[in-house]
Image (cartoon, helix red, strand yellow):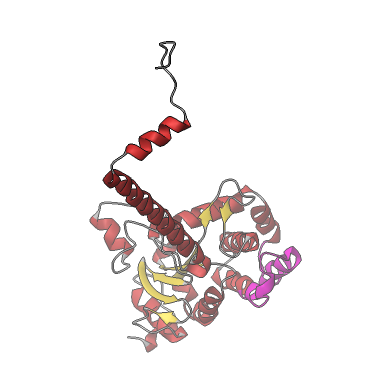
């Protein structure tokens, strides 16, 4: 209170006097709290940087109720009473369902697809393929997704999904895919190459182009990414057969107890087929 009897506002000098009058213990406690807060902030920033650096080619493990365990997604879902026909749908004609969790511009994905180039001709009549791409949904981006190897990969993903959707049969799609992979650096970057691959493979080019350049392609990519996120798969390339984790190629073959050669996959597809149509003659080699 000053000489006029009015309350004098506290200024810097008063605050300094108050801080100086604080007990030493209280000042020390405040300093420790500030140090702990700073350490926590630094730890969070470092963890975020590490996670960001692991995104490319499927190193980031997305959380999922089924991301921990044996990888038997069907069994896990059934135990919880969950049915997702969009995730693991019965294949046409009771065919064996092969799911490839991949990125179109990931070398590991190309390695797996090259192996399956020998599997498809042998047993395509009893199997179907589903592509599930590893990426992040982003409604603000041009293609409504963020892909680990850039927008060109998102475009390549859409091209492959549209070719699969509008294929005549599985070998037709695989001819298209093999053509793209043989020009790996141009995937998603050269529309003329993509169209040439579609034509050479025998695709309906009009239907393919309409899909790849319109909302249909973006919707297919969205569904594909949702399938991957729901499955909890984060490594490109991961192979599922009938909803079960069969093998991973991630800088080397991993988690492949049944082997990873074309004949190993042919054997397992033959064994998994329970349909009524005649089995390919090659299945006789694997009783």
203 lies left or right of 121: right
Q: Magenta stretch containing residue 186, yes or no?
A: yes
Q: Is residue 148 above or below residue 178?
A: above
Q: Which SS does the magenta portion mostly show? A: helix
Q: Quadrant of the N terminus?
A: top left
Image x and y of residue 127, in percent: 45, 71
The residue shown at (39%, 70%) is: 241
The residue shown at (32%, 56%) is: 65
* Residue furthest to the front: 3
Q: Is residue 285 above or below residue 144?
A: below
Image x and y of residue 283, in percent: 40, 83
Q: Which residues are magenta?
A: 178-204
Q: Quadrant of the C terminus?
A: bottom left
The answer, for residue 84, to whether it is visible in the render is no
Image x and y of residue 28, in percent: 31, 49
The residue shown at (63%, 71%) is: 176
The answer, for residue 95, to whether it is visible in the render is yes
The residue shown at (57%, 56%) is: 146
Q: Nearer the viewer, residue 65 or 283?
A: 65
174 lies left or right of 204: left
């Amino acid at each position: 209170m000053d000489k006029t009897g009015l309350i004098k506002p506290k200024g810097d000098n008063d605050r300094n006097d108050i801080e100086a009058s604080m007990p030493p213990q209280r000042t020390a406690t405040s300093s420790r709290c500030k140090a702990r807060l700073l350490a926590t902030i630094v730890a969070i920033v470092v963890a975020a940087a590490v996670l960001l650096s692991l995104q490319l080619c499927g190193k980031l493990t997305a959380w999922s109720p089924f991301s921990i365990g044996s990888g038997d997604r069907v069994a896990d879902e059934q135990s919880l009473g969950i049915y997702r026909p969009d995730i693991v749908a019965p294949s046409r004609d009771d065919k064996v369902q092969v799911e490839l969790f991949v990125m179109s511009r990931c070398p590991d994905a190309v390695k797996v697809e090259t192996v399956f180039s020998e599997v498809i001709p042998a047993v395509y009549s009893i199997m179907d393929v589903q592509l599930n791409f590893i990426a992040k949904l982003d409604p603000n981006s041009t293609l409504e997704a963020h892909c680990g190897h850039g927008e060109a990969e998102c475009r390549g993903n859409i091209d492959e999904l549209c070719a699969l959707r509008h294929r005549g049969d599985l070998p037709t799609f695989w001819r298209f895919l093999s053509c793209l992979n043989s020009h790996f650096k141009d995937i998603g970057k050269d529309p003329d190459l993509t169209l040439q691959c579609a034509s050479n493979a025998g695709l309906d080019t009009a239907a393919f182009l309409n899909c790849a350049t319109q909302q249909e392609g973006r919707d297919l990519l969205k569904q594909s990414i949702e399938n991957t996120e729901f499955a909890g798969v984060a490594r490109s390339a991961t192979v599922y057969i009938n909803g079960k984790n069969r093998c991973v190629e991630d800088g080397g073959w991993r988690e492949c107890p049944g082997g990873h050669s074309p004949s190993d996959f042919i054997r397992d597809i033959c064994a998994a087929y329970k349909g009524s149509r005649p089995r390919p003659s090659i299945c006789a080699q694997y009783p």
